[in-house]
Structures are given as structure tokens and as C-alpha cells.
Image (cartoon, rainbow, N blue to C red):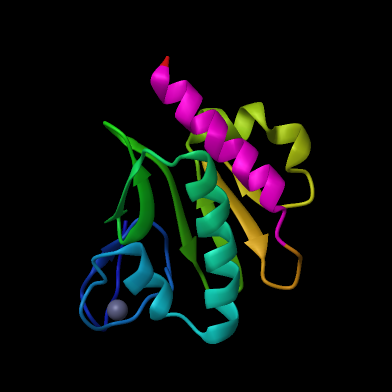
Amino acid sequence: MWKCPKCGRAFQNMGQHHFCGESPNTIEDYIAEQSEEVQLRLRQVYAAIKAVLPDATEKISWQMPTFWKGRNLIHFAASKHHIGLYPGGKATTVFADQLTEYPTSKGTIRFPNHQPLPLELIAEIARWCGQENAK
Ligand SMILES: [Zn+2]
């Protein structure tokens, strides 16, 4: 846990990039708070996940855009130099072979801002999260 010294909000990730104002309540609001360049990338990630998890509830959880169905399925978030995808620790193990190009730690994948987004892979991971949850 990390607490922003400016606004006092708590985040899961150290130095989490955010807007120190009112908390966004929807994924759209969250995206709208980011820079234009980041917004474009976030919208691509959002659309890729939404397409494969159409019946999940969308919300902000842990200050991050979240797809939820009985529990959190997957989160994504903008940081200064990357977009983070948080599909859970099992997913990063299962997809490890396809994630070698991206900085990955247990439960966290970082897509650097200077690299194209692997949207098909993101969709595949999100779909897997939905299938795992349905088991
Ligand atoms: Zn803050």
C-alpha cells in the first residue's frame, strides 16, 4: 500500500499515477483524467477487455478501472511510463511465455508507453480471467 502525500488516498502500487482531486467513480471518468496520449491507449485496453467480458460489472476498485463479477476479475491502470494490467497471480504464471517482452511480476504486467499495446493478448488474458472465475 502507498499513500499519496498530496491527497492522502491509498493505492496498491507505489507512486500510482492519479489525479489528486475527487476520485473518479467510473472507468470513463478515470480515463478522462489522464493525458490525451494515455487516454488513447487506455481506451484501447478498455475496449479490448470489454469485448471479452461483456457481462462483467465495470467499476473503480483500488482506484483502478476494474471488471467485476462476484469478485475483481481484472484491473488496469495508467502509470507515468506504462499501462499496468492486473489479472491476478495465476494469470501471469499461465501467460508467462507470452509476456517475455513486458516487465511482469506476480499479478502485474506493465506495457511501456513507447511500445505498441498487444491488444489481442490483453483480450486473451481478460477472457481467461472470466473463464477462471466461472469455474
Ligand atoms: Zn494524490
Residue beneath the point at 34% across and 81% down: 19
Q: Position of residue 87 (x, y in %)?
A: 50, 40
Q: Position of residue 46 (x, y in %)?
A: 50, 58
Decide whether residue 79 is among the magenta residues.
Answer: no
Depth order, front residue of 48/3: 48
Rendered image quadrant of residue 15: bottom left
Range shown magenta: 117-134
Rendered image quadrant of residue 7: bottom left
Decide whether residue 132 is among the magenta residues.
Answer: yes
Q: Position of residue 20 (x, y in %)?
A: 28, 82
Looking at the rendered image, the quarter that the C terminus falls into is top left
Depth order, front residue of 105/112: 112
Q: Is residue 61 visible?
A: no
Residue beneath the point at 47% across and 22% down: 132
- Left or right of 39? Residue 112 is right
Q: Position of residue 8 (x, y in %)?
A: 20, 74
Main secondary structure type of the part rendered in magenta: helix
Depth order, front residue of 52/65: 52
- Left or right of 35? Residue 66 is left
